[in-house]
Amino acid sequence: MKRAGMLRQVSDFSDFSRGHWLQELLCQGEEPSHIQSSPDGQHLLVLQKSRPPALPRVVAFQRHGIGGADLERNWQPPQPALVGLLFLQSPVTLGSWALALVWEHGRTEVWHFVVAMGWQLLQTLELCQGARARIVSVCSQGANLVWCEERPPLDAHSDTSKCAFRFCVCTRALEMGDQGVWLGAVRIVLHNSPEYQVLASPQHIFLVPATASFATTSKFLLIWHPEKAKLTITAPSAGFIHSKVLRSSSESDFRKLLLGSVGLLSGLAPLDIHTSAVSNSGGLLLVSTKGAVNMVEPDGTQRHIFDLEGGPLAQGSHVQLKTFGSILACMLAGVLYLIDQSSGRLIEKKILSVKEVHVLDSLGEEDSIQLLTQTGIYSFSFSKPEDSSRPEPCLVEMVFEEACRYYQRRSLSSSKLTVEKLKKGGVFQAPVALTAILQHSLHQKQKPARGLQDTYAKLLSTLSLELQSYMSLELLKTCVVCAPESEVESYCEELVEQEVSRVLHSDMDKDNLAYLNSIFASFPKAAWKATRSCLQLQQNGDGLLVARATPEVWKKVLGGPQQEEVGQNGVVPLFELICASFLRFKPKWLPSFVELTQQYVSISWAYSSKEGPEGRVPLYKRALGVVARKNKRSEADDEMELELLLCSKRPKAVLQALHLLICLKRWQRVVEVAEKFSKLSPLLNKEIFTTLLAEFAQHRELDPYLDMLWPLCPADLTASDILAVVLQHLPHSQEDPVPFSSKGNQLTVGLLKPLLQRVVQRPCVQDEMYSDALQSPTFPPPTPPREHKIPSKAAADDAPQPPTARTSSPSALVQGDTV
């Protein structure tokens, strides 16, 4: 971990061509609007917007007096003002650059410095195509200029709401060569938009709302990806919202871009932006009026870095942001904050003796910061700790921070628990014991238990395996840093596998899920291999996908935090992460994996249980959502959607897949799906057959497959039911009906005859109900044996007369004849 060193003066303005003028300017308290160093560090540009009677001007002078005249340009309102100072790299000559001065009305002057001759004007160009256009913000990315221009309406009395959308974001290539400078064609990125400030990173363009005059548009940011021609909508309060690929100029309309997200955007909180700047890592740094420093990544996610001290920022306060490697330098009211961007830790807070301090670019130096003051330029350097054998202090801090989050979640008190309270309170002994064990075990390699309390020594023996795992993980990280380039990939794969396995065997909370998202985003191939290893995914001899993961791991994969719990900050649940990896590296396995997970769900959770994943959104729908989020659609994606619908074996999903196949006119596959899934249930069989019968009535595409279609007819479907479906779906013709059509595509009785004969000749359903009983050899039941007794004569006389022969049984007739 880096620590700050001492300030040392590197220049006292004596070597500047205009050092006395700059020193006098700073001492008078006239703070320049903008100070910037040239790419080679030899020149300093000062933009001064002075109050009258002095004129606003821009001055470019030399820092080391290498010879040649300085550049100075001034203007007087209402002349067009200067809106941009851009350094452009020449693709022809390495290290060669030019300075572009962009004026408000679109005129661009390209200047080049020649040693011993000074500044020379190469070319004067016109950026805007319209004479009434006015540039409000401009930036450069490589050989392209990107700007936001105002296009006033022709009608001076236009509606106020329409006037708010009178801006346009454009881009144009500016190329330099031996023959001169020339502009490419104008390309419109966004039109009919509000005013935006454009900020360029190496790969992306950030569009920050310039004013809060329109309520809805001041709630989100836009990120333009030039290589993908895609615009992303993101909001600090909600994270990633929507992205859209702009394939044509009609899709570049601002209001059409927001059409599908108006409801979500209306409920967001307004943006709270005091200062914005682009970091060297490509993210957008935002400072709120409350002093919170946040980073918006190019994918739309946001993370908090640091909170500046002193409470809310005043409206006129000036905040400077510069990044040097992994260090963020923040200057506010004479106080310099040095912050680690990755962890958000404050490296050092330096209170300077003067308030008029400007942070300059340190070219090629990531271990020092240059500060411009009234007395000269100072360098503030970093150094590594001399004693590297001490236990890492940040590890101890991490233990207490994790303990704070753990106890805060389980606390009933409304007061916030801090690290200081945790250290001084003496109530919670677990973090104290763990830090003591870590300090001793990591520092004393030979006898780690020496100096520990007895209770800690016993706990150390219990944690010995965990500590060994931690030490091996730290050793592996060291190998990754120190390994040659050829071995880095193998070390990274091993490191990712250990991290994924560790997280899958711990509590799957929001923090761990966000950590897994970052791993899958940074190391996609290694994360895919780690997933296969943790779930033990492989194909058996029959070509079926099998998994031998433990039930605990399966529950982490399927039962972790869901989308509604993690929010919309770009973090997706683990199941979606794994499905995206399947889709990228092994798409053929994705339907089998979803089917495998459904089998596990049916065993582990009760049907429709709200605790299980199927009680929320079905797994096949979640997998379909992953496929739908792909940037580029292909025929393989359509086939994947069909397979996911069919592998679910749900009636609605099967019918949806059947309708998709019908729309694609893939009739052979339609009949195959019908034959396979009609066996699942009688209701699904009836729905499938009715759907195909309706298609049969409309066209003749299914005629070659009637021999396979008619056997699927449900048993309870009668001839009248079939005729009703056919008549209902017959196509309506605009011409008068004729008995014989020349087109030959009409439905005839001959085509329906085999089906109707099949239904009419089929036994009635009620007959089938009794068929088993009627064919049984025990029906009717045999006559029970009777005893032949000769009654007495008196009894015979008093007995009633026997029934007639027509109603008597055969045995009774025999007995009567005998009497």
Image: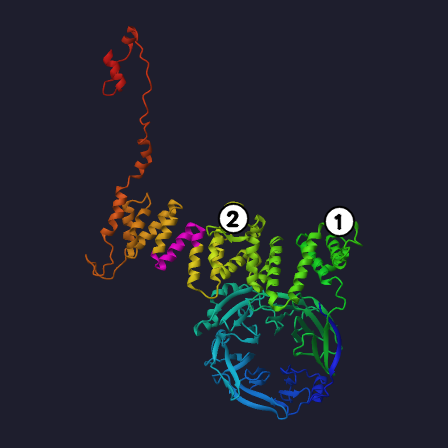
Left or right of 544, for residue 313: right
Identify the element where label 1 is drawn. helix
Identify the residue under disc 1.
458
Quadrant the C terminus occupies: top left
Vertical placement of residue 797 versus 265, above or below? above
Residue assigned mark 2? 601
Instruction: Give the amino acid at mark 2.
Output: Val
Q: Position of residue 754 (x, y in %)?
A: 25, 48
Magenta range is 645-667
Which residue is most to the right?
451
Quadrant of the image occupied by residue 316: bottom right
Q: Position of residue 278 (x, y in %)?
A: 60, 73
Label 2: element kind: helix
Q: Measure how far apart labels 2 and 1 are at the Cα level.
A: 41 Å
Q: Residue 786, image x and y in percent?
A: 32, 16
**In the rendered image of this protein, does residue 164 appear above or below residue 500?**
below
Q: Is residue 646 magenta?
A: yes
